[in-house]
Image (tube, helix red, strand yellow):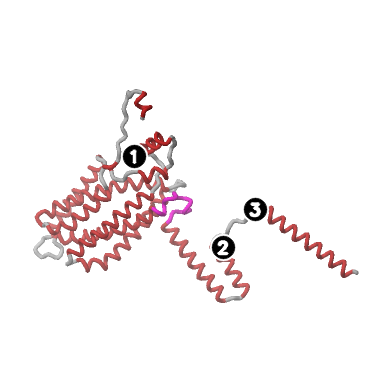
Amino acid sequence: GFTTGCSSILRSANKSVSSAASNSRDSCPPVAPRSSWSLAENAGRLAKIRGDPWAEIGWVRRKKVLTFFSFLQSIFLPQGYPESVSTDYLAYQFWDTIQAFASSITGTLATQAVLKGVGVGDETSTVAAATVTWILKDGTGMLGRIAFAWSKGLFADVLNDVAIFMEIVAPAFPGCFTLIVCTSGFFKCIVGVAGGATRAALTMHQARRDNMADVSAKDGSQETLVNLAGLLFSLFLIPLVVDNLLLTYALYALFTILHLYANYQAVRAVCMETVNRARLHLVLQHYLKWGEVPGPAVINPQEPLLLGFRQRLKITLGAPLHTVASR
């Protein structure tokens, strides 16, 4: 009788504990998912408790891999990524990396051609002539910076590829070499001014936690890594194109196409949330046609990238009311 009574008491206690546990699970909020780092640590502790050497080795390897990726993220990505940047950050940086690599390769081809044109490897050329040519090239570029800061409306990326092409073909025209190289330097400095201006606007767009300095610094780190990869690739490329003019032109054409395509995709990946003249025209046109204000995701893909294809926003002062209503 005593044993039977104790068993019934234990069964009732177990039922009450089970019901209390189920009620607590129903009432408590869901537990947030753990990060991969905490899961790896828990797996390692469990492996140590069970005495499984292979599981413990796997945990150590996962921990090293996670540490390595965390180190790379701290160098090349802004602190707090992805919450600290805009949603289009990764897509833009991906295409920007590809275009920077292609531009680095074409720049190396152009440098090789310019050095050959100023007389490197030619016994008849003098140091003074090469120095004068280089000074004229840099001086013309400085004038280009001043001129672009005053003017507007040039195609920076296309102009950069045109400047590189001029430097590549310059050795084929010895009589006009200095003029071609100076014009190329003029164009390149215009590209530099335009690139700095657009980079500042993109940094303001991408920084979402007042972290413009961090975003700009990490962009510089990414660009340095890409340029380093381009230099390493150029070490294997230059011996192949030194005496092969046809291969030089073919590689220039290939990487220029890649450069322009990556630039196009990078610009299309950006979803600007501010209004310029072209986007304002599209917003007003959409509102007058459909009666609603479109969002940035609708307007940005419609914005023309080439200046010649942009429609001007015409404003007529003193227009009759019936003409406005009819439109």
Task: Report x, y in % for residue 251.
Answer: 24, 62
Task: Report x, y in % for residue 2.
Answer: 89, 69
Q: Nearer the viewer, mark 1 or mark 3?
A: 1
Task: Residue 38: give its label.
Answer: 2
- How crowded pointer 1 is (Cα within 10 Å; few <14, some 14-19, many 20+) is rated as some
User: In whole angstroms, how far apart are the C-alphas of marks 1 and 3?
Assistant: 49 Å
Sequence-wise, which precedes: disc 1 or disc 3?
Answer: 3
Q: Is 97 situated above or below 322?
A: below
User: In whole angstroms, how far apart are the C-alphas of marks 1 and 2?
Assistant: 49 Å
Whether tag 1 and tag 3 are in contact, CB under 8 A, the answer is no
Whether tag 1 and tag 2 are in contact, CB under 8 A, the answer is no
Specify the amino acid type for callout 2. Ser
Res 224 quadrant in image: bottom left
Q: Which residues are magenta?
A: 77-91
- How crowded pointer 3 is (Cα within 10 Å; few <14, some 14-19, many 20+) is rated as few
Residue occupied by mark 3:
29
Q: Is 23 situated above or below 325?
A: below
Q: Is residue 128 at least partly visible in the picture?
A: no
